[in-house]
Image: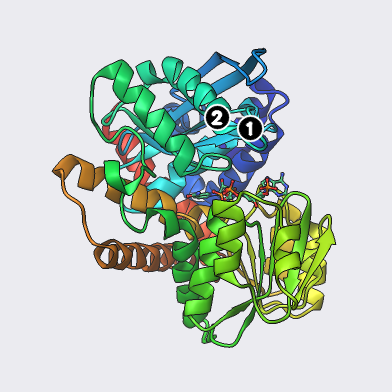
Amino acid sequence: MSYVDEVIETIIEQNPGEAEFHQALREVMESIRVVVEENEEEYKKNALLERLANPERQIKFRVPWVDDNGQVQVNTGYRVQFNSAIGPYKGGLRFHPSVNIGIIKFLGFEQIFKNSLTGLPIGGGKGGSNFDPKGKSDREVMAFCQSFMTELYRHIGADTDVPAGDIGVGAREVGFLFGQYKRLSNLYEGVLTGKGLTFGGSLTRTEATGYGLLYFTNAMLKANDIDIAGKTIAVSGAGNVAIYAIEKAQQLGGKPVTCSDSTGWIYDSEGIDVELLKEIKEVKRERLTAYAKARESAEYHEGKGVWTVKCDIALPCATQNELQLEDAKSLVENGVLAVAEGANMPTTIEATEYLQENDVLFAPGKASNAGGVATSALEMAQNSQRLSWTFEEVDAKLQNIMENIFANAAAAAEEYGLDKNYVAGANIAGFKKVVEAMNAQGIV
Ligand code: NDP
C-alpha cells in the first residue's frame, strides 16, 4: 500500500465518525499524491503526513449561559489549532447547530492550505460551537459570546491564535467576543479579526471573501478567454460571502439571479437587488420571503433548487456539501462554464469530478475563498502597526493576492501535468510551503 493510502486509512480509523474531516483529508491527500511519491521515503521516515493530519492541539469546552427566561443553557465550544508551521493559528469561529468536532477539523485542515496559499504568515485553525444565534435576542447572544470567550481567551492571543467570523459569527458576535477578551486579559490587541471599524477592524474585511471570490473567478475566466461581463450567475447563500460575491459580480458586469438560505431560494429575473438583500439579511435579519415580497421580479421557492437555474457561472456560497452530483449534472446540462466555491467544501467529491470531467472550470474554495482570511491577515498587520489603511489600499492588496493565488495554483497544476485541475494545483501549492516550513523546524 502506498504511504498516502496508509495514512488515509490510519487517520480515518483513529478518528471515527468525522465524515467531513475524512472527506477533506481524502481530497487533499489524493491531490498531493504526486508530490509525496517524489519524496516518499523521506516523508514516511519523518511521519510528515501523520503530523500534518493530526492537529497540534484540540480544545473542547463547556459553554453555560442564561437565556431570557432565566433558564441555563449548555453548549459545546471547540478550537482546533491544527498547524502553526508558517504562522500563528488563524481561522474563523462557526456558530451553527450542526457544529461538531468533525466539521471543525475539516475546516481547520483546509485552513492550513488556504492560509499558505495567501502567501501571508498564518497557520491553520478553526473553532466554533453548536450554539444557534438565529432567533436569539442580542442579550442572549452576548451572554453566550462572553461565556465562550471566558474559556477560549486562555488559548488565544495576537501572536498565538487569531480567530475570526464564519457561519453565524458576524460583526455583532466578534464585537462581544473581543470585549470579553479585552476584559479578561487586560490587553488591547488584534486577537480577533473582522472587528468593527471603530475598534481595529479593517476596511474591506466585510466584503473580502465575496470580492476575493470574484477576483479569483475573473482571473480564472480570463486565463481561459472568457469574459464575465453579461454572464448569468447562480449564487447560493444569502450571508456575508454571498452578498459581497453578488455585489462584486455586478460591478464586473455579471448578472447574479439567485440567492438562498436554509429554508428556500430566490430567482430574480431582473438580477438580485443587492441593497435590498443587505437590508433584509444584515439589518433586519429576516428570511428571504421578505425579499420576494418587496420585489416584483422575484420568485421565492421553498427548499433547494438554485442549481436548476440556467446559468454560465455557479457560485456556491452557503455551506459544505450543498452542491451534489445531481446538481452538477443539472448545471452541466444547462451549459455552465465555471463553478467557483465561495463556501468551504460546498461541492461533494463526486460532483467536483463530474464537473471537471465535463470541462467545467472549477475553483476550489481553499483558493477562491481565501480573500477573507487574507484580509484578516492584513487586519492583523494594521493592528500591529497601530495604523488603518484605506479601503482602496486594502482592496488593491486583496485583488493582487487573489490573482497570485490563481497564478500559483495554475502553475502548480501545470508543473505536475494536471492541466486545468486547479483543485490539485491549489492543494499542491499550499502543501509545498507548509511542508518546507515543517521540515525546517524539526520534529515538533
Ligand atoms: P453566514 O452565516 O453569513 O451565511 C451563511 C449562509 O448560508 C446563510 O444564507 C445561511 O442561511 C446559509 N446556510 C448555512 N448553513 C446552511 C445549511 N446547512 N443549509 C442551507 N443553507 C445554509 O456565513 P458566511 O457567508 O460567512 O459563510 C458561508 C460559507 O463561506 C461557509 O462555508 C464559510 O465557512 C465560508 N467562508 C466564509 C468566510 C468569511 O469570511 N465569512 C471566509 C471563507 C469561507 P440561514 O441564514 O438560513 O442559515
Within-10-Å neighbours for mark 1: few <14, some 14–19, many 20+: few
Instruction: Look at mark 1 in the image and give the residue it sits on.
Output: 136
In this orientation, which residue lies closer to the viewer: 285 or 81? 285
Type of amino acid under label 2: Val
Front residue of 73 and 409 = 73
Mark 2 neighbour class, 10 Å CA radius: few under 14, some 14 to 19, many 20 or more: many
| Image location of residue 168, percent across then percent down | 58, 40
> Quadrant location of residue 258?
bottom right
Which residue is located at x 56 percent, y 36 percent? 94
* Residue 391 pos. (x, y %): 29, 63
The answer to whether residue 41 is seen in the rendering is no
Q: Nearer the viewer, residue 161 or 70?
A: 70
Q: Earlier in the sequence, mark 2 or mark 1?
A: 1
State the residue position of label 2.
141
Locate the C terminus by quadrant. top left
Q: Amino acid under label 1?
A: Lys
